[in-house]
Amino acid sequence: MPELIVYGIVLGSIIALGAIGLTLVYGILRFANFAHGDLMTAGAYIALFLVTVLFPWLDIPDTTFGSLSFGWRMVLAFPIVMACVAIAAILFDRILYRPLRMKRSGPVILAMSALGASFIIRMIVLILWGADSLFYRPGVLRPAIELPHEIKIRPDQILILVTVLFLVALLYLFLKRTKMGKAMRATADNMELARVSGIDTEKVIIWTWGIGGALAAAGGVLYGIDVQLHPGMGWHFLLPLFAATILGGIGNMYGALIGALVMGVAQQVSTAYLLPTYKPAVAFMVMIIILLVRPQGIFGGGRA
Amino acid sequence: MRVLEVRNLTSGYGETDILQEVSIQLHEKEIISIIGPNGAGKSTLLKTIFGILKPRQGFVRLQDEEITGLSPDRIVRKGMSYVPQVDNVFPSLTIQENLEMGAFVRTDDYRYRLREVYELFPILKERSTQKVGSLSGGQRQMVAMGRALMLDPKVLLLDEPSASLAPLLVEMIFEKIVDINKTGVAIVVVEQNARETLKISDRGYVLAMGQKVFEDTGKAILENEEVGKLYLGG
C-alpha cells in the first residue's frame, strides 16, 4: 500500500502538469479545453521524434545518466518539446478558438471545436507512429531503489517528481512576481476591468495558452518516461485532468495541484482492489462524487 | 481650458439608441456630475466616452485630440481612467497588486505615484498585502479609485461611486473625490445620489430618456425646484 501511494504521487504530479494548464485556460477564457490531454500526447511524441530520429541523425550521444533511463538527448528534447507544444496551443487558439470567441459562440460550440482539435492531434499521431505502444528506450528494465516500508521507486520517478516540483515553483514565481503573471491573475479575476486598466488581454491569452501547452507537453513526456507512449494516452488523461481541476475548484491553480495528487493516489491505490483497467472509472467516480457533494471544489473556484 | 469635450454623442446596445445626441464639457480642475433617473443613459454615456461602447454618431475629444471609437486600452494611455460601477477591483489580488495593475501601461518608475495614492488612502497602505476580496465595500471603492489614479490621469470617470455603500461611507467617498480633484484631476461623476453629488460638483448635467434635459452649476440645479421635482425625486 505505501508503494501504491508513492506511485500515485508520481502519477498525480504528471496529472498536475495537465490540470494546472487546464485550470489556467479555464480561469481566463471560461473555456473547457477537451484537447488538453492530447496536447500531452503531442508533447510525448514530439519528444520521441527528437530522441529517436532527429538527435541520432545529429550524432548527439545516446549515453544515459547513471541509473536513469535517459540522457542528454532527452534533456535537450525537453525544453524544445515544451516550446513546440506551447506554439501549437497558441496556434490552435488563434486559428480555431479565437474566431469562435469573436463570433460569441456558445460554450457547446467551443467544446465541440476543442473535441475536434483533440481528434486532429490524435489522428496525426496515429498516422505518423501507428497505434502500438512505444517507449523512448525499449527493452531495458531499470533497477528500483528500495526504500523502507517495501517501497520500490525507480530513479526516473524521483526525477519526475523533482521536475514537476521545479516547473510548479517556476510557475508560482511567474504568477506572483512578474508583471505578465500578475496581469494573468488579474485577467482571470475580471477581464473587463483588465481591459479598462490598459492590460492587453489578447497578449495575456497567448501567454496562458503557451504556459498551458508547455506544461501539458512536459506532463506527456514525463508519462512517456515513466510508463509508455500511446496515441490515446492524453485522451485517457482527460478524465483525471478534469476531475483534478474540479476537485481543486475550477480556475484555482493550487487546487488543481492538490486535486491532481488526490486523483493520482486514488487511481493507483484502487489497483490494490480493482483491475487496473478500472482506473478511469475511479477518476470518473471521484469526479461525480465531488460534483454531487461540493461542486465548487474543495478550495472554491475561480482564483488562480 | 477644456480637457474633455463630448459632442452630439449617440450610442446604445444592439439596435436601440439609449443615448441621443448628448453633449457635455469638462474643464480643467472641474468636477461635473451626470445625474438623472434610472435608465436615463448615464452609465451608457460614460461607457461610450471610454470606448467600451462604440458611438453611432458624435465625437469625443480629450485635450483637443479626437478619441472617438478608440478602444479602452488606447484611451487609458491618453490620460483618462474609468472606474466601473460594479466589479471594479481584482478580488484575488492584493491591494498593492491591484494598484500595480492600474499602472500596467506605465513603463517609467511609478513608485512615487504609488506613494501619492497611498497618501490619499492611508488605510490601503496599512493593508497593502491583503487580498481585495476580503475588504469592505468602502475600502474596495478606494482600491478601485486608487487603481484608476495610478496612471496620473487628466480625467477620471466615476460610475456611481457611492452605489451600495452605507450612508457614512458615502460621505467619506465624496470627500475622497474632492481630495482627488484637488490634486489636479478633472472628474466626471455619474450618480443616483444626486443631491450629495451636486454639492461637490462645479456643474451638473441632468439626463432623462437618453437626452440631456438640463445643465447648470451644481448649486443652481440644487436650488431649481422644478428640476428637483422632476428628476431628483422631490
Image: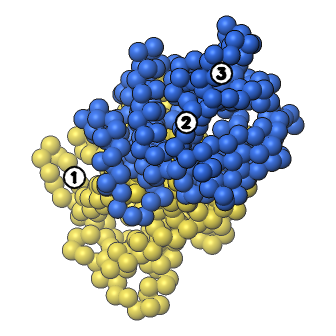
Residue A239 on image: x %, y %: 53, 42
Q: Nearer the viewer, mark 3 or mark 1?
A: 3
The one nearer the camera, A183 or B201, is B201
| Amino acid carrying mark 2 in the image | Ile
Tell me what hue chain B is rendered in: blue
The one nearer the camera, A188 or A95, is A188
| Amino acid carrying mark 3 in the image | Ile
Q: Label for residue B161?
A: none
| Amino acid carrying mark 1 in the image | Lys
Residue projecting furthest to the top: B234
Residue A277 on image: x %, y %: 49, 42
Residue at left 76%, top 50%? B59
Q: Residues within 10 Å of mark 1 (few under 14, many from 20)?
A: some
Mark 3–mark 2 Cα distance, whole angstroms, equals 14 Å
**Mark 2 — on which chain does it sit?**
B
Residue matched to label 3: B221
Tell me what hue chain A is rendered in: yellow
Left or right: B97 in relation to B69: left
Residue at left 36%, top 57%? B110
> Can the viewer see residue B231?
no
Residue A134 on image: x %, y %: 49, 67
Q: Are discs 3 and 2 both within one chain?
A: yes
The one nearer the camera, A15 or A284, is A15
Asked if A258 appears above or below A72 in the picture, the reply is above
> Quick check: marks 3 and 2 in contact, CB under 8 Å?
no
Q: Are discs 3 and 1 both within one chain?
A: no
Q: Earlier in the sequence, mark 3 or mark 2?
A: 2
Q: Nearer the viewer, mark 3 or mark 2?
A: 3
Q: Are discs 1 and 2 both within one chain?
A: no
Q: Residues within 10 Å of mark 3 (few under 14, many from 20)?
A: many
Residue matched to label 1: A152
Residue matched to label 2: B31
